[in-house]
Image (spheres, helix red, strand yellow):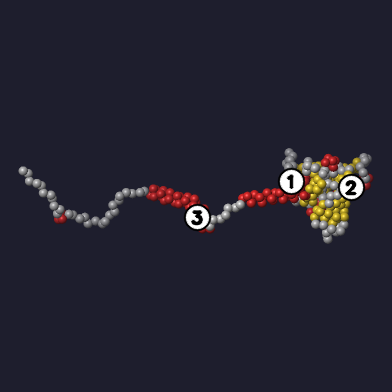
Amino acid sequence: MMPKKEKSKFNSKNVQIKEEELSITKIGEMNTENQSSIVMLILFVFILGFIFFLPNIVTLIKGKQEKPDYSMINNQEQEKEQDSEKQQEESFYTLSSSLTVHLEEKIVLSNFKLQDNQLSFTVQNEQDTRYYFEKENYFLELYSKEQTLLERIRLEDIVVSKGENVNVEYTLQESTSSLVNQLYFVKKTENDYPYRVIEKDEEGVQKLTCTNNHNTLTYTFSNDQLVSFEEEIRYSLGDTNYENLKVEWQEKSTFLNQQTGLTSLFVDTENRFVVNTTFDLQKANVKDLNNHYYYEKDTHSKVVAFEMEARGFVCK
């Protein structure tokens, strides 16, 4: 029978201790790139959460605010539109002999009459000072019964002293006279004038020609700014007051020809006379000539077109 082996006993004498500094034992290691990605992910999640819960946070801080009443806002907008339409409707006047228009405080228009293409009415000034229509830049617009615009007249050259009445008269186009039913008085600024497209010729020059019975003005523009214009006056032997007009325009032509930047030529034949005048706005000062048809340098083309047509000219 074999003898049992005895277990070895721990002998402290056999233990050896290394004399070294303590060291760290690594269980695992995460690289720097992974650390940055996790930090960015956490930050991103935090920002999203903050944005998502921001309304609730604001509500908690400020308290719950009432929502706007959109129905009330809509009603207010509708009321404004209705007031605007009502005001526009009230500005239209039906043409009749009994019509009275209070244009401004103490400026009253009455005695309207339309006969043989002539529209006339009386202006009464009850103000304490003289009243100038031109300073206010008033226009009279003529409409059909269906409120289709037929013609526009600029109210100028009307000066009414205080406490006085003045009768004014305008010649309408035949088509206007046969259809006009509504009158509309309105103030306008140059910003209200519609833009007028004036085509350039082969040399890049813009020209607008405005014509009435006896007068033709050709305006030349550069980039819609007036640089010069020409005027041609024509009267024939059969025209009313022909001889007096011939003397008058011969004197005017002589006067214009003496002005700086102007060249005027008077031509008289047996049956008619013609006056041709050229205005060089680089040199001429037309403001002192006191003529509505004579515009100063750099006047915009839309101003010339709009106002000349409102004087009865056909401009193209």
* Image quarter of residue 142: top right
Residues packed near mark 3 inside 10 Å, few (<14), some (14 to 19) or many (20 plus): few
Q: Earlier in the sequence, mark 2 or mark 3?
A: 3
Identify residue for label 3: 57
Secondary structure of the residue carrying numbered label 2: helix
* Image quarter of residue 221: top right
List x then y, in percent, for residue 28.
32, 49
- Numbered badge on residue 249: 2
Identify the residue shown where x is 45% and y is 50%: 45
Identify residue for label 1: 194
List x then y, in percent, for residue 204.
73, 41
In this orientation, does residue 48 appear?
Answer: yes
**Which residue is situated farthest in the top direction here?**
202
List x then y, in percent, for residue 208.
78, 43
Mark closer to the observer (3, 1): 3
Q: CA distance from mark 3 to mark 1?
A: 53 Å
Disc 3 residue type (three-letter): Ile
Q: Is residue 44 left or right of residue 286?
A: left
Residues packed near mark 1 inside 10 Å, few (<14), some (14 to 19) or many (20 plus): few
Give the number of callouts.
3
Secondary structure of the residue carrying numbered label 1: loop
Disc 1 residue type (three-letter): Pro
Return the residue nearer the eye: 100 or 11. 100
* Image quarter of residue 214: top right
Secondary structure of the residue carrying numbered label 3: helix
In this orientation, does residue 168 appear?
Answer: no
